Image (cartoon, rainbow, N blue to C red):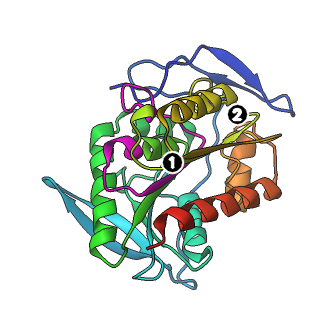
C-alpha cells in the first residue's frame, strides 16, 4: 500500500551545491534523497553510560514488539515514532528530551522495524518500503493503550519524517490518542484523511524542505487548510531557512544531514519547536 503522496521527479541542490534526487513515489516508495553512498553507524549504548530506557514488550493481536520507555511512571505519556532509520540514536535523543520537558513526560518508542536499524539511505528506503503500515498503526494504538494502563492518564503521539506522517494518521485512526505533534511528515489520503482527525494536531515544517507533497511548504499549508476546514484544533508552524529533519541536532544527526545535502544548522529553530511542542502537549495531556 502506498503511504505517501506521489512526488513529481525533481532534483534538489543544497547551498553547498550537493545534488540529490527525489524519485517519483510508486508502490509504497517515498524518496531516494541523494546520489551516492554514505553510512552513519547508529550510536551504541555505552557500557560506561547506562541507558536511561526501560525495555518492555507490548502484545497486540498475534504479535509482540519491543518498546523503550523513559520518564516518570505517572507522567503524561507520549509515543515517539522513528524516522525511516529505525530506533536509532536520534529518536532516542528525542525521547529523552521529551521526558525532561517541563514537569516531565513518559516517552515510549515502539520498535516499528522489529529490531532493524538502518545505516544508509538505500537500506532505510528498502526497510521502509517493506513496512506494514496498517500494522504500524496498530503498534501505535497498542503503545498508547500501554501508557494509559501503566500510569499515564492521557497519552499523545509525536514522530519525525515517516513517524510524523504516522503521528497524523494516529489522530485519525487511533481514538485513544489525546494530542498529536508531527514533525515534517503528512500521510497520504490512502492511509488517513486529516480532516477526520479526532485529536488536536500541531505540525512543524522547514521552509526549505524539498520533499514535495510529503513535507514541503505546500504540503504543510495543505494540511493546515484541511485541519482548519474540518474544525480540528491545530497549529502548523513553518521554520524559515530550515530544511527537512531540522530537529536532528546531535553531532551524529548533523553529520548525517550534511551527508544528505542538508547543511542548515539552526539551534534556535529546534528550541522554538520544542517550546511549542511542550506547550501543546502540556495543554492537552494535563489531567
Front-lying residue, 120 or 156: 156
Magenta span: 170-194
Q: Is residue 132 left or right of residue 103?
A: left
Q: Quick one: label 1 or label 2, which is nearer the N terminus?
A: 1
**Is residue 81 among the parts visible in the rendering?**
no
Q: Residues within 10 Å of mark 2 (few under 14, many from 20)?
A: many
Towards the viewer: 225 or 263 = 225
Main SS category, magenta section: loop
Whether residue 187 can be seen here? yes
Circle 1 is placed at which residue position?
Answer: 85
Mark 1 against mark 2, which lies toward the viewer? Answer: 2
Measure the C-alpha gap from mark 1 to mark 2: 18 Å
Based on the picture, tell me whether residue 183 belongs to the magenta stretch.
yes
Against 279, residue 206 (above or below) is above
Q: Position of residue 278 (x, y in %)?
A: 62, 65
Q: Which mark is residue 30?
A: none
Residue 158 placed where, x, y %?
50, 54
Q: Is residue 138 magenta?
A: no
Check disc 2 and report the residue beneath it: 209
Label 2: state its secondary structure: loop
Asked if residue 79 lies left or right of residue 239, the reply is: left
- Quadrant where the image shows the N terminus: top left
Give the residue at x 58% y 24%. 213
Q: Residue 129 location in percent, x, y?
A: 40, 32
Above or below, 125 against 160 in this view is: above
**At 55% from the left edge and 68% from the top edge, which residue is drawn?**
282
Amino acid at each position: 500500500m502506498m503511504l505517501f503522496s506521489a512526488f513529481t521527479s525533481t532534483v534538489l541542490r543544497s547551498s553547498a551545491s550537493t545534488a540529490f534526487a527525489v524519485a517519483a513515489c510508486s508502490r509504497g516508495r517515498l524518496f531516494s534523497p541523494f546520489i551516492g553512498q554514505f553510512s552513519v553507524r547508529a550510536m551504541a549504548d555505552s557500557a560506561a553510560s547506562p541507558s536511561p530506557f526501560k525495555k518492555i514488550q507490548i502484545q497486540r493481536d498475534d504479535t509482540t514488539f519491543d518498546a523503550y520507555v523513559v520518564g516518570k511512571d505517572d507522567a503524561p505519556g507520549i509515543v515517539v515514532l522513528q524516522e525511516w532509520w529505525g530506533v536509532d540514536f536520534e529518536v532516542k535523543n528525542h525521547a529523552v528530551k521529551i521526558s525532561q520537558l517541563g514537569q516531565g513526560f513518559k516517552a515510549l518508542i515502539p520498535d516499528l522495524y522489529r529490531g532493524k536499524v538502518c545505516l544508509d539511505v538505500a537500506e532505510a528506503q528498502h526497510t521502509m518500503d517493506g513496512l506494514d503500515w496498517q500494522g504500524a498503526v496498530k503498534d501505535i494504538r497498542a503503545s498508547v493503550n500501554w501508557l494509559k494502563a501503566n500510569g499515564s492518564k492521557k497519552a499523545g503521539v509525536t514522530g519525525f519524517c515517516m513517524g510524523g506522517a504516522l503521528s497524523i494518521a494516529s489522530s485519525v485512526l487511533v481514538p485513544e490518542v489525546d494530542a498529536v505533534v508531527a514533525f515534517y511528515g503528512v500521510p497520504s489520503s490512502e492511509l488517513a484523511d486529516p480532516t477526520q482527525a479526532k485529536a488536536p494536531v500541531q505540525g512543524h515544517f522547514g521552509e526549505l524542505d524539498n520533499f514535495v507533497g510529503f513535507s514541503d511548504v505546500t504540503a504543510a499549508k495543505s494540511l493546515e487548510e484541511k485541519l482548519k476546514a474540518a474544525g480540528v484544533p491545530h497549529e502548523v508552524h513553518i521554520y524559515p531557512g530550515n530544511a527537512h529533519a531540522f530537529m536532528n541536532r546531535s553531532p551524529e544527526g548533523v553529520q548525517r544531514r550534511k551527508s544528505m545535502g542538508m547543511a542548515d544548522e539552526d539551534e534556535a529553530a529546534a528550541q522554538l519547536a520544542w517550546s511549542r511542542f511542550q506547550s501543546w502537549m502540556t495543554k492537552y495531556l494535563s489531567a
